[in-house]
Amino acid sequence: MLRIAVPNKGSLSGPAAEMLHEAGYRQRKDAKELVLVDPDNQVEFFFLRPRDIAVYVGSGRLDVGITGRDLLLDSASDAEEVLALGFAASTFRFAKPVGAEISSVQDLDGLRIATSYTGLVEQHLAEHGVKATVTKLDGAVETAVHLGVAEVIADVVETGTSLRNAGLEVFGEPILISDAVVIRPKGAGEDPAVEQFLRRLQGVLVARRYVLMDYDIRAEKVGAAVALTPGLESPTVSPLHTEGWVAVRSMVLRKEAQRIMDDLWSIGARAILVTNIHACRL
């Protein structure tokens, strides 16, 4: 039975559960459940703190897990990323008091930095040859400068509102661009159960990104139409009962669907329909 670690709370939890549900897996109905068995899919889910998931997976106790890229790298565990899931995006950055004469990572030499991600920060500083004192805080990192614990902080930045309210501003290049990822132990051999799990999640990602587009068009204009809707491999073209007309079916990017419909209409396509894709294997 495949053993999978899933975030039990926070910004990763809800989207992860939704994606697993779309992939056909059972999900818990009670947030207090710590273990859930899905016998139909031969899977056992373990609901853990997001920060601990990389440690459990890296130890080999669990086969695969869903966590944040930032948490994976900060843990320094023996786990590796195998699939990006496209949700819970965030940017990890340095922030300083507004007006402070600090503009790059090199200016941090000899300073005190407060963060919840000491592993990430220490690795980043080492890569740039900078020596600084890194202090670990589990929460409210924004107040560290005001209370004199540090001159600079490093934290996850989404809108920047919390930083501005604390009189801080970001500087320099991002330390890391993060989102939710699937991880597994480093060096793990091929496992058909893990491959099937990844295929299911990849199917959800494709279904969210693409839609199915159908339309009718005169046969002599198929070339121009297919240039607009080439599909992933090749569109399906079928003759209609009305002579000289064909029906075309193709997958197109969801974000471009409206523009493509306009372009198809302008070259004579009619009966243009767009349908959601609920699942796929490509």
Image (cartoon, rainbow, N blue to C red):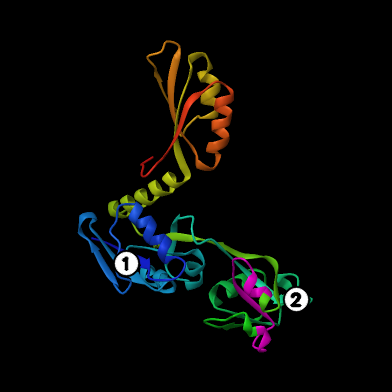
Q: In the rendering, at what x and y percent does residue 160 appear?
A: 64, 69
Q: Is residue 175 left or right of residue 282?
A: right
Residue located 30% across and 70% down the image: 30
Q: In the rendering, at what x and y percent does residue 167 appear?
A: 71, 78
Residue positioned most to the front? 271
Residue located 47% across and 61% down the image: 180
Residue located 56% across and 72% down the image: 120
Please name the amino acid that badge 2 sits on.
Answer: Val
Q: Is residue 232 left or right of residue 25?
A: right
Residue positioned most to the top? 243
The correct choice, above or below, for 137 with respect to 232 in the image is below
Question: Residue tagged by mark 1?
Answer: 62
The range drawn in magenta is 145-164
- Is 170 colored magenta in this rendering? no
Q: Name which of mark 2 and mark 1 comes first in the sequence.
A: 1
Foreground pick, 109 / 187 = 109
Badge 1 element:
loop
The correct choice, above or below, for 208 with respect to 122 in the image is above
Badge 2 element:
loop
* Mark 2 and mark 1: Cα distance apart in space: 44 Å
- Is 152 colored magenta in this rendering? yes
The answer to which image quadrant residue 112 occupies is: bottom right
Question: Residue tagged by mark 2?
Answer: 98
